[in-house]
Amino acid sequence: MSFILIVAVLAMGGFGFAMIQARKPGPLAADKVVVITRDDDGGSIPDQLERAGVIDSPLWFNLTLLLDGSRGKLKRGEYLFKEHVSLREAEEALISGKVLLHKVTVPEGLTSEQVVQRLRDNDVFVGDIKEIPREGSILPETYEFQRGVTRASVLAKMENDQAKLVDEIWKKRAPDLPIKSPGELVTLASIVEKETGKADERPHVAGVFINRLQKRMKLESDPTIVYGLVGGKGTLGHPISKSELQQATPYNTYIIEGLPPGPIANPGKAAMEAVANPSHTSDLFFVADGTGGHAFADTLDQHQKNVARWRQIEKDAKDRLAPDAAPPAPAAPPAKVHGALDPVDPKAFGGLAPVAATKPPAGDIAKRLARVGADRQTREALLGPSGPLSAGASTRSLADIGAVVQGVNDQSAVDATTAAADDGAATTGPIQSYPMSAAALADQQSREARYGAAPGALSDSGAKMMASADAAAAPAPSAHPGARPRAFDASEGTPLDPLLNTTYDLNFPKVVPVIK
């Protein structure tokens, strides 16, 4: 009796301790999804739970199952275990078989090929789809499936649900509809589905098509053109062209009369109900109104006005987008104020130097006057009787003095023609050009700053001032035929102009040879 009593006390103590362990919070720190597979794939269920961190010890979990008598009642699948789930809660979840369900949404208006592609891209399902279902046979809806379900079974459920729904709607259709079968109802509903995405407009759009069918008018629906060209692909990728509008296909409702041979998409419940019970109006036309909806009309004249209004809305939208599409203009640089004797870049002012806006500081006047004197001496040395740029030296060619710079000293045919026209007669040969030294370039820039005009663009007053300033130093111009002395480089005004092209730096002899 004492032995039995001791055993009973130990058994009761062990049972109580096991119950406490079964209800104690587990080690799982956060909610976790665990897929329980077969024993030959992942081991026993307690071992899989331990590897996933759901339980601490497979021994206590097996003991709990043994005490509850539920070892053979556990179901495999994908489960969501809450944080700190106990052994008893984990056991109840596996016994209930409430596996995690994944939502799969099929939007209205997709083709069967597009639906199949979505299922193939979803890794929740297994297996392949051998045949694409008929167009319009899939019910667009949100479905819930557990992981591991075959794609074929998913499609089968979608088709069964669509067949049941079409049968129910067909029985509740309005009388005297110009559609003769559930298949025609689905076909027209697919056109309505593609024409409008607004739920409250579907009965009105369906009413327009019903009216056109009753009057034996062509439906003239753009989505039917697209389906006739690309089939189950769904979209063209570009707006419908005029040639595509006129292309004859069995689905082009601009050419064929009545309904196309089959649906062009999988319509939803609302579109099918709209066709079965359309709005009673006299409207025969509709066009987009710019708000996401449509403007309806019962006469062609009113419809054309609605179309013109829509075209204007499209044009206004493009005009509003045009400034955003263009790149932003660079910010204008701050204006620079130049003094009377400052060197000025003619490019910055379109060839005209600005008028002096401020008086130079008194301390700089002496330096600038000295610079002006040095410039005058340089000009006299270049243009004087013995200077290399004098009229008497104009008979020497650039080849003779070895100062030809290919591309820089060449004068374009346009300049030669212009120069001949200025002289009143065309020259018999190419106009002689002369290189510009660094001193001549400095002199040119100085005169531009003082007289306010760029080469070839002097004002009348500037030209007179230039003539008076150089009268003492410049000799009389030579009338040598076939040669025209110039004080500027022959590339002036061309793309090779040194003032416009920084490729050539005339301040260094490595670019322009020294005149000997």
Image (spheres, rainbow, N blue to C red):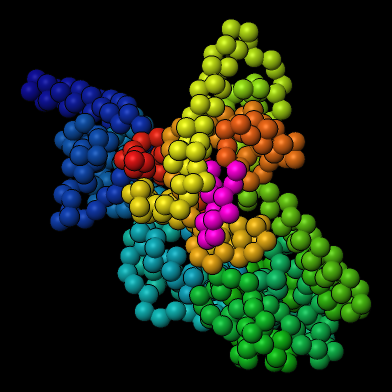
Q: Which residue occupies the foreground of this view, 370 or 309?
A: 370
Residue at the far left: name it: 3
Q: Is residue 204 above or below residue 469?
A: below
Residue 213, horizontal then vertical, whole percent: 79, 87
Indicate whether 160 appears above or below 260: above
Magenta stretch holds residue 490:
no
Expressed as whole percent of the image width and height from the top left, the position of residue 249 reads 61, 90
Q: Position of residue 367 (x, y in %)?
A: 54, 13
Within the image, what quadrant is residue 165 found in?
bottom right
Q: Is residue 242 left or right of residue 434?
A: right
Quadrant containing the C terminus in the rendered view = top left
Magenta residues span 476-487
Q: Quadrant of the N terminus?
A: top left
243, 391: nearer the viewer: 391
Front residue of this view, candidates 116 and 402: 402
Q: Is 38 placed above or below 71 here? A: below
Q: Is residue 445 visible?
A: no
**Which residue is drawn at the image coordinates 69% and 52% (left, top)?**
321
Q: Nearer the viewer, residue 266 or 509?
A: 509
In the rendered image, residue 481 lying in the magenta stretch gets the answer yes
Could you tell me if residue 265 is visible in this image?
A: yes
Q: Main secondary structure of the magenta part?
A: loop
